[in-house]
Image (spheres, rainbow, N blue to C red):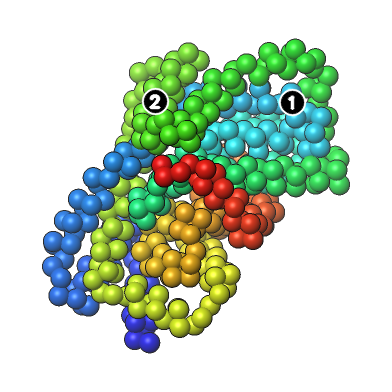
Amino acid sequence: METIWISVALLLALLALLGSGLWVAFALAAIGCASLFFLSNISVGDSLATAFYGASVSWELAALPMFIWMGEVLFRSRLSEEMFTGIAPWVSKIPGRLLHTNIIGCGIFAAISGSSAATAATIGKMSVPELTRRGYNRKQILGTLAGSATLGLLIPPSIILIVYGVATEQSIARLFVAGILPGLLLLAMFAGYVAIWSILNPDGAPKGEDESLPFREKLRRSRPLIPVVLLIVGIIGSIYAGLASPTESAAVGVALAHLLSWRGGSMNMTTFKTAMMGTVKTSTMIAFILVGAQFLTIAMGFTGIPRELATWINTLALSPYMLLLALTVFFILLGCFLDGISVVVLTTSVILPMVEGAGIDPLWFGIYLVIVVEMSQITPPVGFNLFVIQGLTGENIFRVAWAALPYFLLLLGGVVLITIFPEIATFLPGQMGNQ
């Protein structure tokens, strides 16, 4: 029982540090220092040095800045405009019409950026003004963008899956492949909801001139999408086929992203420098968080708190479903105050022993965790997608959150489905053998 109170005290101290505005990495390191100093006889300096080295030498981690760089380059290209032009003619006769461009566009861009916020910003800059001009329902414009952009965390290559893989020593290639079917499932659920809503509210998705385009014109408008689709298929296909590791495919993706940007006329020295600076800032931020989390993990290991917590939870005899229900509530609440990467690196050292003790596949758990973290991207007060869309549209953040509520519930439905049918996440990795 004493361990529980110590854990609660450490959690409250961490939340207090985060609430004070201290950087996440420093807050994690501070709690690690306090834990080692008061609860063990281990040298704080030696442990910090070990954590710094251990968090920075992983070869798999090299894929992280590469995929961020690829997303930064394409983020500053004409990709969003070309995606809207290429997708719009094909969805003009589906219930919901151009609202599906938000869903499909976010799905495509998610597969090349790996970032939820970048997906929302890139697609939103093009789709929000265009859909507003055409008279589409404002709430659905905001909701489809906020909800679909969360898929940037799940559809590979996903930055957060790389972080989870490094933190838990899981295969990043298998995690990437595991995210494909759940990502497509969520896209289908979002599209289905929009279609049903549009049938019930026909005035919210007005008809447009795209409906009368001949087939050949639709094909012509879709040609700019071909290089992007080939880029996605090349990255994911090479990983799935075992031809390249995530790091190797990321390097090829960066080269092709620069080629596409140059071919589209948007690559110049200013764009190159801006993309490089954005990559350095984001990668450094994530690296600092990983070092802080690694240090906290080492500290927790020496204090024995995770082991004792796992033992205590095992004494409660919770079924795997009850454990997942409790964790879902916990992650949603935590996600209201922390970004997704921080949630993952902060909790894995404590949660994973409990999960493995309950007989839950850590590969499946990674996909479950990412979907739950996706939900936190559209929950106030710290929903990153909400802030991005607020900046794009000037809307009140709670109005954006209200528009995103149906997609929050759909994500929750996705969690239920992969829990009942875990093969949705584990089938494709199971076909990869021992890669």
Residue at (54% x, 70% y) in the render: 320
Where is mark 1, residue-wise?
90
Position of residue 122 measured from the top left corner of the image (x, y, whole percent) = 54, 33
Three-letter amino acid code of the residue under disc 2: Val
Few, some or many residues within 10 Å of mark 2 (<14, 14–19, 20+): some
Position of residue 392 measured from the top left corner of the image (x, y, whole percent) = 57, 39
Q: Please determine whether, in this image, residue 317 is positioned above or below residue 130.
A: below
Tell me where residue 435 sits by quadrant: top left
Few, some or many residues within 10 Å of mark 1 (<14, 14–19, 20+): many
Tell me where residue 25 sits by quadrant: bottom left
146 relative position to 305: left or right? right
Tell me where residue 249 sits by quadrant: top left
Q: From this viewpoint, which residue is outermost toward the bottom?
A: 1
Residue 252: give its label.
2
Position of residue 45 measured from the top left corner of the image (x, y, whole percent) = 13, 62
| Tag nearer the camera, 1 or 2 | 2
